[in-house]
Every structure is written in structure tokens, then in C-alpha cells.
Image (cartoon, grey):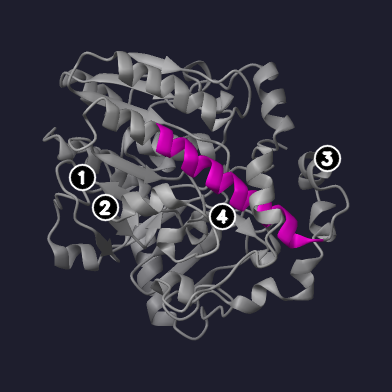
Amino acid sequence: LNPNYLGCYGNHTVKSPVIDRISQQSTIFTECHTAINLTTPSHASMITGVLPSVHGVYENARPVSTDFKTVSELFSENGFDTMASVSSLQLNPEYSNLGQGFNLFITAGKPGISGEITVNRAIRWFSEASNENLFAWIHLFDCHAPYNPPLIYRHMYIDEPAWFSYPKNQPKRLKSIDKEHHASPALVDTRAFLKREPFNRWFSEWLGDTADETYAVKLYLGAVSFTDRQLELFFNALSQKGIWDRSTVLITSDHGESFGEHQIYYDHWGPYEQSIDVPLIIKKAYNADRSIDTTLASTLDVPPTLLAQCNIKIPDSYMGVSLVKKSEPSNKLKKRMIFTEHTRNVAVTVRDSQYKLIMPKTRQDFYPESIEMYDISRDLSEVDNIIDKNPEIADQLTEALDGLMYEISHIQKPEVPCSPDNSVTDQLKSLGYLD
């Protein structure tokens, strides 16, 4: 889910009334980045609290070691009933090893199932739960390509002549988006991109020979609205059970999505903001105050934030911080740096409050061949590589990155388990997860 396609982040075309309404009683983080831009490794980081370079998973077909102390185990050990309901086959515990600490793990039977099924399963669990303390992970897949929302949500935007708009009162990040990206000829005709491997294999039946960029984006908007509706059903169930007010709800994503930026369409390849920028909305229990937080955040902060809300001790091994009951002084958070690793370990990026440095490790399509640096405060679209203009800043970011890698090299890491059988990898290939 790309936050630029939510109403509460400034998009006044998309219909996301439920998330927007929840955001009115929540903290909205405008600068949150994923730990890695791929589904299984990203969720592994949110469950274990560590970067991929520690848990060792950089691909969807690789399970995480069970040696890590998961956030679900900590909740379970502190008297919580725990449940996971997921929408994608690869996250099933037999393939991901992410089932530790869950009393019930409701699996998906194929690479992507409808959020309606996933949410209904979660609602059933909540309605039958007798324990007052509940922890749930609910994973929805509908905003993942190929976007295929139900018919009513498809026509919600296909029949709308003005498919996207940039209102004047946008948050900082949206104001900086280069509007000309959506008008350039290279982005209107997507066929050159869709002929490339491996995209032609999983987009051909979905898009055919269309050259209309807006068609896919309209379907994406429909998927966002459909997801929003499923959250409404779930939140209503919490209200009917009488536990909404005392519930902490955290909404985020495993990665973002690109719609032509840097010539990447309908996917989350590449080290750029569209791929690694994610929404983060936190509704605290017994608190209906709205606030906007512009400090740097990471999906690594998800487990310590949830644990702190329930006064559960945060393990020293966790690499994030609590964003609600802040465990770090505010001046330290302002100086914070955020690290994002990338699919197949091909690159790593480091961000401070103004600059972003991309360090490639191996050659990969849609990744730079040499180091790039951008002033995100002025160039959110990442079109002006200033690596040669600001060597001192580049040195500082590189030093921070080297320091992190040195720290990680001294952490004792368990062996990564074997990959699942070929039948699973074949199904993931069908969805475009693997080459």
C-alpha cells in the first residue's frame, strides 16, 4: 500500500473513508519506511524485530529461523490469546516459519486470497474469544498486483473522468511529488516495460496490450477502497464486541508500490521512495487524539510500539523503538537514521531527516549501478542525484551504514532454514514473486 493513495495522506480522489476516519483519532506518521521491500522478509522483520541482514531472509521462498523471539511469542507469554489471518500462501507458517507464538494461524490456500475471506475469519475468532487480552495480525493482499477488485470497486474509478488529483493542502511528502511524472510520454505507454522479464509473464493476461497507464491505477484505487471496506467490517466487529475503545490498532504495509516512477510499473522493485515508503497509522487504546508525526519511522518499530502499549518488556535484540511511548529522547529521534535493505540483498539505503543514500551491492534491474544520493526534503521524486555535489554528507551516511553493517556482523545469527518444496515456488512464480 502506497500512502500517497490514501485520503488521510492527502489524496482526495481515492475513497478510503474508514482509514481516513480512524486517522482522525490516531497518530499518522508521514516518514515511515519498510525494513525491506518484499513480502515475506518484510513481515519477518515486523514479527522478529530485526533487519533481514540479521534474520537472513531476502526472498519470499525462504523461511525465517525459529530461534528468534517473535512479538507474537511475547504477547502469548504475557497472557494474550494470539491469532494470525493471512491472505498469501507464502506467509503460511509451514513456508515462512512465522507461526511462533500464535495460538491460531489461519492460512491462505493460494498465493493471494480476497481480503473479505481473511477478515471474516478474523472476525469469527474475535467474536468467539473469551480472553480479555487479544493480539492479532491480519494481512490483506488486495493492493498487490495484479489489482483485481470486485466489479463495483472497479467501476468506482474507471467511470470517473478525473482519476487522480493533487489538492492544495497536501502533507509535505505529497506536495513534493513531481506531477510531470504522470504526464511524460514514457509513462503513458507502459508496453516497453511490460515486455521485460519477468513482468511480461504475470502482467500480460491482466493488462494485455493496453497503453493506458491510468487503467491499472484506477484498478489499484478500487483495490484500496475494497480493502478500506474490509477494515470497516472488522472495526465494526470490534465495536459490537465492546472492545474498540480499549484496542490499539496499527495499520501499515510491508512495502509500497510504483506507478511509473523510475520506469517501474505496478510493482515494488527498486530502492526509491514509492517502493519503500509505507503508511503508518496508530490508534492508541483509550485515546482519540489526532496527531501528525514527521519523525523518521521504520516497520522495525512495529513490534516495540505494540509491546510498549501493553507494558511488555521490549527485547534488547529488537532494532526498532516504540513510537508511542517513546523509549528514546526526542532529540535522539530527530537525529535518527533509517535503514532499508532490498530484495535479494542487492542494495541498502540509509535515510536521515533530509538526505537518502542508495548503496548498490550487486547489479540488478531497476537498481542503480553506482551510489546515488538525494535531498528528499527538496526532491522526493529522486531525480537529482547529488552524490558528487555533497561529498561530506555522503561520507556521513556511508559511515553510518558501515557502522550498522559492522554491528550486524558481530551479531550471532542462526542458520536460515531450507526453502519450501518446488510446488510452493511454482505457485509464487505464477504471481510474479520469483523469476
Q: Residues within 10 Å of mark 2 (few under 14, many from 20)?
A: many
Q: Earlier in the sequence, mark 3 or mark 2?
A: 2
Q: Earlier in the sequence, mark 3 or mark 1?
A: 3
Between the C-alphas of marks 1 and 2, the distance is 7 Å
Magenta stretch, residue numbers: 212-233
Q: What's the residue type where badge 4 is placed?
A: Lys
Q: Main secondary structure of the magenta part?
A: helix
Kind of element beneath mark 1: loop
In this rendering, the label closer to the viewer, 4 or 2:
2
Kind of element beneath mark 2: loop
Residue 211 pos. (x, y %): 84, 60
| Camera-side residue of 255 and 50 | 255
Between the C-alphas of marks 4 and 3, the distance is 33 Å
Between the C-alphas of marks 3 and 1, the distance is 43 Å
Q: What's the residue type where badge 3 is placed?
A: Glu
Q: Residues within 10 Å of mark 3 (few under 14, many from 20)?
A: few
Q: Is 141 covered by the magenta stretch?
A: no
Q: To which residue does mark 4 refer?
A: 361
Q: Given contact means CB atoms under 8 Å apart, are the residues at marks 4 and 2 in contact? A: no
Q: Residues within 10 Å of mark 1 (few under 14, many from 20)?
A: many
